[in-house]
Image (cartoon, helix red, strand yellow):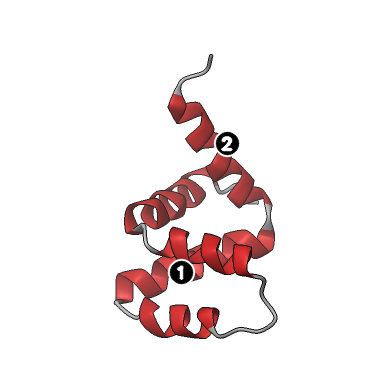
Amino acid sequence: MLPSWHQDLESLEAISQDDVTRDLVLRMSALCQAGSLGPFLFELAHDAELDDMTKSTLTEIAADPEFLLAVEDYLSRTEILH
């Protein structure tokens, strides 16, 4: 069995591979750091185009500022410059 950090690394890598998800998580991280995540969450909760599972997942991610910072740090450290 692989260590639990391996699953965390897989999650970070999955986020980094999906452009839309990566951009959304980075935006959420920036909003969180600026203390302005509340309006985003309000709009998210009232968005009729999103299903409840997506809303729930995004709300859960937004509630974890350490995870948002970890994703931002991971993306920054693993970015390949061309």
Please tell me which residue is depicted at 55% across the width and 85% down the height of the picture. 46
Any mark on residue 78, and which? Answer: none
Measured as percent of width and height from the top left, residue 76 is found at 47, 51
Residue lying farthest front?
Answer: 52
Looking at the picture, which amino acid does disc 1 mark?
Answer: Met
Q: In this view, does 30 lie above or below 66?
A: below
> Where does residue 81 sit, x and y in percent of width and height?
60, 50
Residue on which disc 1 sits? 28
Above or below 42: residue 51: above
Amino acid type, callout 2: Glu
Category of crowding for the residue at label 2, using alpha-carbon neighbours closer than 10 angstroms: few (below 14), some (14–19), many (at least 20):
few
The alpha-carbon separation of the residues under discs 2 and 1 comes to 20 Å
Q: Is 44 left or right of 21, judged from the image as shown? A: left
Q: In this view, does 23 lie to the left or right of 33?
A: right
Give coordinates of residue 8: x percent, y percent: 48, 36
Which residue lies at the image location 59% right of the left edge and 59% below the top edge?
Answer: 22
Q: Position of residue 48 (x, y in %)?
A: 66, 84
Residue, disc 2:
10
Residue at image point 51% right, 85% down = 43
Asked if residue 48 is positioned above or below residue 58 in the image, the reply reads below
Q: Which mark sits nearer the N-terminus, 2 or 1? A: 2
- The answer to whether residue 35 is left or right of residue 10 is left
User: Would you call the spot at circle 1 few (<14 residues within 10 Å), some (14-19), or many (20 or more)?
Assistant: many
Which structural element holds mark 1?
Answer: helix
> SS of the residue at dot 2?
helix
